[in-house]
Amino acid sequence: MKHRRILHIDLDAFYASVEELDNPSLKGKPVVVGHDGPRGVVSTANYVARQYGIHSALPFAVAHRLCPSLVVVEPHFDRYKEMSRQVREIFLEYTDIIEPLSLDEAYLDVTENKCGMTMAVDIAREIKQKIRETTGLTASAGVSYCKFLAKVASDFRKPDGLCTVHPERAIEFIDKLKVEQLWGVGEKTAQRLHNMGVFNGKQLRDLTLLQLTTQFGKMGKVLYGFARGIDDRPVVTEWVRKSVGCERTYLKDLTEHDEMVAELDLLADELVSRLTRNSFKGRTLVLKVKFSDFVQITHSITDDVPIEQKEKIVTMARHLLDDVDFQQRPVRLLGVTVTNPMEEGVGKRPIQLYIQWPSFSQSEND
């Protein structure tokens, strides 16, 4: 049986590394990238800052307590996108089967590659070297026969790492993994597994398919496969967009209905722009509300025709807002999303390695 050869390439501490490259005086200092506002969160931390326990999505208030000497740099997304374009050009020297996950990481299927190279690890090594020579950045690479193991392997020897998981060594490798290292296992799923006495891959493999699907539904089947080194997901070069949305986190909690209506009007403007830009047509509008205590709810409404006009979005969103009880809990975040595509294939387009990111003042989830 011929195994696939999959690479996962991850640029190390990408945003912070670009900032250090452009400003060498930052090297050796604890550097984070993000907007240091009252509700700002860290986007990327360099490896010096990580030694203090600082990581992405950490509130700046906490980050400063952990490291008083922290250096905060505002993001420069145009620069990051340009560096991503350069990296993508390197990928394309080896394969056209590329699945970007974000600005700084991607899967590559090099089973059949443009250079005729037989060893995927040699391709990974060359790509890492070319990234360093072309951009001055370092990257970590994972090599295996499936996406799950390639992803885990790329995290294994950071920074500037290279790790290969051979098919015959896969089970041995998986046995030692913490369940938190498995794709799709977040904090809540990990805690549920811990409650079942499962902390690593070996213990996970002891559970039956019935036990896992009873506890976790469809995700249980995925976990069952991962524990056995089974992951047939292809490297996807195209995608079908299922939703388009936008949201804002507010520096000051919203307490008045009129304030929220005014914000919905602004969000509708942005949503219409994004719908047009992505040629997306959907029939369901979703209102997202996050309260000051971080409890989050969503309400939705579906129409028979596409939701495209601002006036319609505002009217539907206001109707959904009427069902939200915010008397006792101020609102921290509002978001609107159009989903439920009209037909198969709407919004289909090639993925690029670079994406458009909202500003940090507008969203805390990017």
Image: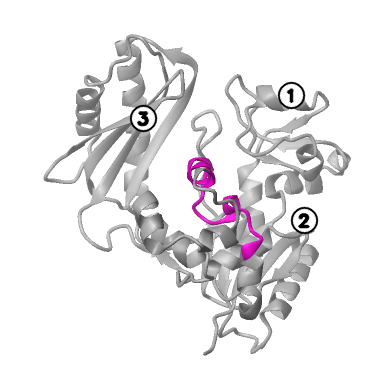
Residue 206: assigned label: none
Characterize the local packing of mark 1: few (<14), some (14-19) or many (20 or more) Cα atoms within 10 angstroms: some
97 or 59, nearer to the observer: 59
Element on which disc 2 rests: loop
Characterize the local packing of mark 3: few (<14), some (14-19) or many (20 or more) Cα atoms within 10 angstroms: many
Say which residue appears at 59% left-offset and 79% top-offset.
5
Question: Alpha-carbon distance for marks 3 and 2?
Answer: 39 Å
257 displayed left or right of 307 = right
Q: Position of residue 206 (x, y in %)?
A: 51, 62
236 displayed left or right of 309 = right
Q: Which residue is mark 2?
A: 159
Q: Position of residue 286 (x, y in %)?
A: 28, 36
Question: Alpha-carbon distance for marks 1 and 2?
Answer: 24 Å
112 displayed left or right of 123 = left
Amino acid type, label 3: Leu
Above or below, 281 against 140 in this view is above
Say whether marks 3 and 1 touch (CB < 8 Å): no
Q: Position of residue 158 (x, y in %)?
A: 75, 56
Above or below, 119 against 365 in this view is below
Q: Which residue is mark 3?
A: 267
Above or below, 39 against 275 in this view is above
Q: Which residues are magenta?
A: 175-194
Say which residue appears at 24% left-offset and 49% top-offset.
340
Q: Position of residue 104 (x, y in %)?
A: 62, 55
Of badges 3 and 1, nearer the viewer stands: 1
174 displayed left or right of 282 = right
